[in-house]
Amino acid sequence: ILLDLGMLSGFDFWDNFLMIALDLCMIAAGYVGAGEHSLEWQAFSLSFFFFVALMFFLTTGVLQKANEEANDDRAARMTTLLWLTVIVWCTYPVYFVLVQRNVLSQCAEVVVFAISDVLSKAVFGILLLADEDLLSSLQDGGAGQIAMTTQPQVIA
């Protein structure tokens, strides 16, 4: 999802790398909190920091590209995919807090996470695959070409 949005927005290799690194840090901090009960709120706070940074970076980048887009339909589809991702992903920290405060049962937790997972992954995929214009930009390299912004140098 992140790489698709990054490629659609014309992010270069390092922008995509940063976005995925933030995502991995967010997941790793969440994993620590899930495994170590005494650190759950500290880990949640750290994970949430990475989440906010990721959402800010992703949102500003995609919206900037959508504003520059000459094709209004394509810009609207890009922002639809962005907001689907942002809104659904914002439910995950809310679920965590509700579970930790015993507002959601274990069964309800599984159901709400499943709903969010289907929306964020399957619906995103269906919307992306149903749009030939967006798919072609990913396939032909257009705005979605991932390239190094600097050439690697060999030190002899």
Image: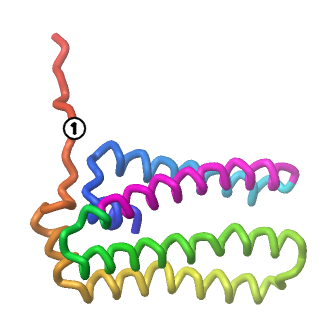
Give 156 or 120, whichever is nearer the viewer: 120
Q: Main secondary structure of the magenta part?
A: helix
Above or below: residue 120 compared with residue 22: below
Q: Which residue is mark 1?
A: 149
Q: Quadrant of the C terminus?
A: top left
* Region of the chain picked out in magenta, as a range: 38-65
For residue 23, side relative to residue 141 (left or right): right
Q: Quadrant of the N terminus?
A: bottom left
Work out which residue is located at the far left of the displayed protein and give it: 140
For residue 132, side relative to residue 14 (left or right): left
Q: Secondary structure at mark 1?
A: loop
Would you identify the image quadrant in which residue 96 lies?
Answer: bottom right
Would you identify the image quadrant in which residue 76 lies?
Answer: bottom left
Above or below: residue 96 compared with residue 13: below
The percent coordinates of residue 21 (x first, y second) are: 47, 47
The percent coordinates of residue 39 (x first, y second) are: 82, 49
